[in-house]
C-alpha cells in the first residue's frame, strides 16, 4: 500500500508536522510506501516534504489530507486518483487572528469553508479528538474515526526529579492570541504578587506574528519585571528541560483541537491548570484542574494550591500518568492503521 | 490534603477571603475574547497597507545574516513594493468609501420604508 500525506504547511516546531513524520515512520515499519507533501515548508526539515506539484498518487493509493488550517489546491487534490482520508485537527477561529496575522486568519477562514467540501468528497474521515469529530458530524460526516495525536514523549528526554528553586509556571504553545498567553501573564502576576514573590513564568512557543510576541514581552515587563521568560525555537531536549524545571503547567487557551502540551505535562508529572475550552476537558479527562472563572484571582489561587498542596500534586501526577495510557503510541498506531485500511478498501 | 474535585471551590473561597483582606484589588477580570465584528476605524486602519519589515526574518537557528540579507533585498525592491502597496491601498480605501455610501443608502431606504409602509 502507498499512503501520501498532504499538509498545508510544515515546520520544525509544528505539531502536525511532527505527527506526519511519526506517521511516515509507522507506514515504513508496516511496509507501506508513499510520499509527504506540504503547501509550504520552512527550512530545517531535511527535504522530508516535497511540493504539492510533485504528488502523483495511483488509483489504489490513499491520500491522507491533514486539515489543520486550510488545504491548498483542494479541488485539484480531490480530483487526483486514489482514496481520500481526511484527518481533521481543527482550525483556529479566524476572529482571533485578523489583527496579528491576516494571512493565517484568511487561511483559517477558507479552511473552515473547505470543511463542507471535504466532508462531501472524502472517502473516509478521521479526527484527533471527539471534539473535532463532533464538528465534522455536525457538517454531515457519517462516521468519523478518532485517532489521537501520535506523540513521541521520549524525544523530550528523561523525567528526572523536580528542580529545586522558586516556583516556576510553564505554558507551551504557539505565541498566538487564542492561546491567551496574555491572560497567563496576568494570572501569573497575581500569583506572584499575592502568593509567591520569587515565582517565575516561562512561555515556550514560536510566534505566529512578531506583534503579538512583542505585546507579550511588554506585558511581562509591565506586570512582572524580570520574572517572565519567552522562548522560541527550542530543541526537544531543551523543551524537556523546561518541563523538568517547572512546578505547574498553566493553560488558559480559548481554543484547542487536542492540546499536546497537556500530555507532555502529564508525562513530567506536573499539576495542570487549564480552561475547559475545545478538546481540553477530553484530553485532560479528570487529570487537570479546569477553571472557567472570569476572576483571574481564582486562577492564581489554584496555582498556589497546586504548587503548595503535596497531596493534590501527587494525586494529579497519578491521574496524569494514568491518562497517558490512552495516548500510548501503539494504541494510536492501531487506530491509524485501521483508518487507513478502511479508506483503502472503499 | 485537597482532592482535585475540591480544588476549584477551595480556590474560589481563598480568592474571596484574600479579597476581603484587601488583596486582589487590581483588575482581575478575564479579558473578553473578540466578538468577530470589526469597527469602521479598524477597517480604515487595515485598508492602508503598511507591511512591517520586522516580519522579514530567517527562521533558521543563527539566521541573523540571512535576516540581514532578506531585509536588504526588501530595501532594494522598495520602489516596486511602494507601487504595489499604494495600488492595493487605493483599491481598499475606495471600496470602503463605496461600502459606506451603500450603507447610507440602505439606511435611507429603511427609514423611508418605515415612514411609508
Image: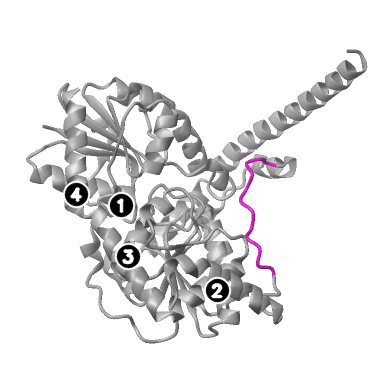
Up/down of A88 relative to B103, above or below:
below
At 29% from the left and 49% from the top, the residue drawn is A149
Q: Is residue B106 left or right of residue A249?
A: right
In the rendered structure, find residue A285 and report the number of the disc placed on it.
none
Q: Which residues are magenta?
A: B27-38
> Which sits earlier in the primary sequence, circle 4 or circle 2?
2
Chain under callout 3: A
Tell me the SS state at disc 3.
helix
Q: Is residue A135 left or right of residue A150?
A: right
Comparing B70 with A332, the one in front is A332
- C-beta proximity under 8 Å, tags 1 and 2: no
Q: CA distance from mark 2 to mark 3?
A: 21 Å
> Which residue does the numbered mark 1 point to in the structure image?
A43
Mark 2 Cα within 10 Å, few/some/many (few <14, many 20+)?
Answer: many
Q: Position of residue A165 (x, y in %)?
A: 40, 86
Dot 1: chain letter: A
**Crowding near pointer 4: few (<14 within 10 Å), some, many (20+)?**
some
Are dots 1 and 3 in contact, CB under 8 Å?
A: no
Find the distance from the CA under tag 1 to the CA under tag 2.
43 Å
Q: Which residue is mark 4?
A: A331
Determine which residue is flagged by label 3.
A319
Is residue A161 visible in the rendered image? The answer is: yes
Q: Position of residue A63 (x, y in %)?
A: 24, 31
Which of the 4 image quarters holds residue B108? Answer: top right
Amino acid at each position: 500500500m502507498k499512503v501520501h500525506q498532504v499538509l498545508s504547511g510544515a515546520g520544525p516546531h509544528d505539531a502536525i508536522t511532527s505527527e506526519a513524520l511519526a506517521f511516515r515512520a509507522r507506514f515504513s515499519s508496516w511496509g507501506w510506501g508513499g510520499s509527504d507533501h506540504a503547501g509550504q515548508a520552512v527550512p530545517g526539515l531535511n527535504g522530508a516534504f516535497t511540493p504539492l506539484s510533485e504528488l502523483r498518487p495511483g488509483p489504489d493509493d490513499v491520500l491522507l489530507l491533514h486539515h489543520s488550517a486550510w488545504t491548498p489546491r483542494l479541488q485539484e487534490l480531490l480530483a487526483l486518483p486514489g482514496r481520500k482520508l481526511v484527518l481533521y485537527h481543527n482550525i483556529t477561529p479566524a476572529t482571533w487572528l485578523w489583527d496579528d496575522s491576516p494571512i493565517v486568519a484568511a487561511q483559517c477562514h477558507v479552511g473552515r469553508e473547505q470543511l463542507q467540501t471535504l466532508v462531501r468528497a472524502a472517502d473516509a474521515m478521521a479526527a484527533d479528538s471527539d471534539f473535532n469529530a463532533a464538528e465534522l458530524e455536525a457538517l454531515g460526516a457519517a462516521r468519523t474515526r478518532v485517532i489521537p495525536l501520535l506523540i513521541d514523549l521520549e524525544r523530550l528526554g528523561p523525567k528526572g526529579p523536580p528542580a529545586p528553586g522558586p516556583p516556576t509556571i510553564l505554558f507551551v504553545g504557539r505565541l498566538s492570541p487564542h492561546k491567551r498567553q496574555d491572560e497567563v501573564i496576568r494570572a501569573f502576576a497575581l500569583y506572584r504578587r499575592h502568593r509567591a514573590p520569587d515565582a517565575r513564568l516561562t512561555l515556550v512557543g514560536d510566534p505566529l506574528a512578531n506583534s503579538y510576541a512583542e505585546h507579550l514581552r511588554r506585558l511581562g515587563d509591565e506586570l512582572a519585571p524580570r520574572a517572565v521568560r519567552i522562548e522560541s525555537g527550542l530543541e526537544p531536549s531543551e523543551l524537556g528541560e523546561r518541563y523538568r524545571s517547572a512546578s505547574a503547567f498553566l493553560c488558559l487557551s480559548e481554543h484547542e483541537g487536542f492540546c499536546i502540551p497537556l500530555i507532555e505535562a502529564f508525562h513530567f508529572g506536573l499539576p495542570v491548570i487549564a480552561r475547559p475550552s475545545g478538546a481540553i476537558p477530553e484530553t485532560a479527562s479528570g487529570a487537570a484542574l479546569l477553571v472557567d472563572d472570569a476572576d483571574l484571582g481564582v486562577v492564581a489561587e489554584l496555582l498556589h494550591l497546586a504548587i503548595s498542596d503535596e497531596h493534590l500534586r501527587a494525586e494529579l501526577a497519578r491521574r496524569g500518568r494514568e491518562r497517558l495510557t490512552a495516548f500510548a503510541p501503539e494504541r494510536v498506531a492501531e487506530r491509524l492503521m485501521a483508518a487507513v485500511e478502511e479508506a483503502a478498501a472503499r | 490534603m485537597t482532592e482535585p474535585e475540591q480544588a476549584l471551590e477551595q480556590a474560589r473561597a481563598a480568592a474571596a477571603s484574600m479579597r476581603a483582606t484587601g488583596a486582589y484589588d487590581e483588575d482581575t477580570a478575564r479579558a473578553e475574547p473578540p466578538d468577530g465584528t470589526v469597527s469602521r476605524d479598524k477597517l480604515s486602519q487595515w485598508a492602508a497597507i503598511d507591511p512591517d519589515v520586522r516580519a522579514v526574518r530567517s527562521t533558521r537557528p543563527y539566521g541573523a545574516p540571512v535576516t540581514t540579507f532578506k531585509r536588504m533585498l526588501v530595501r532594494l525592491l522598495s520602489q516596486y513594493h511602494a507601487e504595489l502597496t499604494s495600488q492595493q491601498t487605493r483599491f481598499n480605501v475606495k471600496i470602503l468609501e463605496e461600502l459606506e455610501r451603500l450603507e447610507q443608502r440602505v439606511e435611507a431606504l429603511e427609514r423611508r420604508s418605515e415612514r411609508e409602509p
